[in-house]
Image: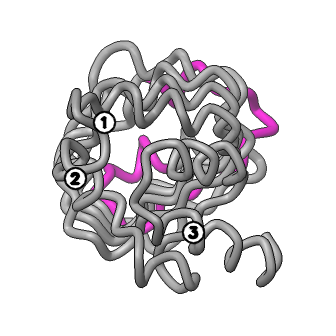
Amino acid sequence: MSFKEEQKILELFETFEEKNIKLAFQLIKSLKLDYSILSEYLDLVQFLENHGRLNPNGNVEKVLLDLHKLKFLSIPYSKLKVLPTKIHFLVNLEDLNLEHNDFTIFPESICKLPNLKRLNLAFNNLNNFPKNTGNLSELESLDLSSNKLKQIPLCIYKLKQSTFLSIQNNPLSECQSMWIFNNFPNSQINHWHKS
């Protein structure tokens, strides 16, 4: 997104008129909330919590529907523990960066993103995965490094061998680490911790 595009979107947001905010959401194709200009005005977590101020219905699902063209979403360093369950409305989302947050369980709603190609959950506190994480069949890159995983999540068994997988700095057994190394040539598993 160019600087001019960001400026236009900011101008639409600053009006606080519902029709302009809807238009701004339709223009957003990439949303990087860590360093972009938008981060000064649009803290996604706060926005979702306070959305009633902008939409009389206060309907988070409606906000996510308005972001249906979004392909890239980056929300690092935000102390997130959960995601909205209706995040799957972001049907075109291809790249999701949730590194450096406070997730302990893999956010199950991510499994419903049909076009997700890159997922970064590094530097969280992940220690558990829901059973349906195998639904991420389009993944090309999965970063689970520097978490608290003691076992290989079931979703990994279902990934394509061409998937880039980073699972380093987790307390996996040497046997599990070797299985990943043998089955995923594009993996990073060095520096594993012995249990």
Amino acid type shown at disc 2: Phe
Q: Where is residue 149 in the image (x, y as percent from the top left)?
A: 27, 49
Numbered tag placed on residue 107 in the rendering:
1
**Residue beneath label 3, please?**
32
Q: In which quarter of the image is residue 60?
A: top left
Q: In this view, does 37 lie to the left or right of 49?
A: right
Q: Can residue 194 be seen in this view?
A: no
Q: Where is residue 153 in the image (x, y as percent from the top left)?
A: 38, 32
Say if 134 sits above or below 186 in the image: above
Say if 66 sits above or below 44 in the image: above
Between discs 1 and 3, the one toward the N terminus: 3
Amino acid type shown at disc 1: Pro
Determine the CA span between mark 2 and mark 1.
8 Å
Q: Dot 3: what SS?
A: strand
Q: Which of 74 and 120 is in front in this view?
A: 74
* Residue shown at the point (61%, 62%) measured from the top left: 188
Between discs 3 and 2, the one toward the N terminus: 3
* Residue shown at the point (56%, 85%) measured from the top left: 37
Q: Which of 41 and 44 is in front in this view?
A: 41
- Magenta segment range? 155-177
Q: In this view, does 182 lie to the left or right of 158?
A: right
Q: Is residue 53 visible?
A: yes
Numbered tag placed on residue 103 in the rendering:
2
* Contact, mark 2 vs mark 1 (Cβ under 8 Å): yes
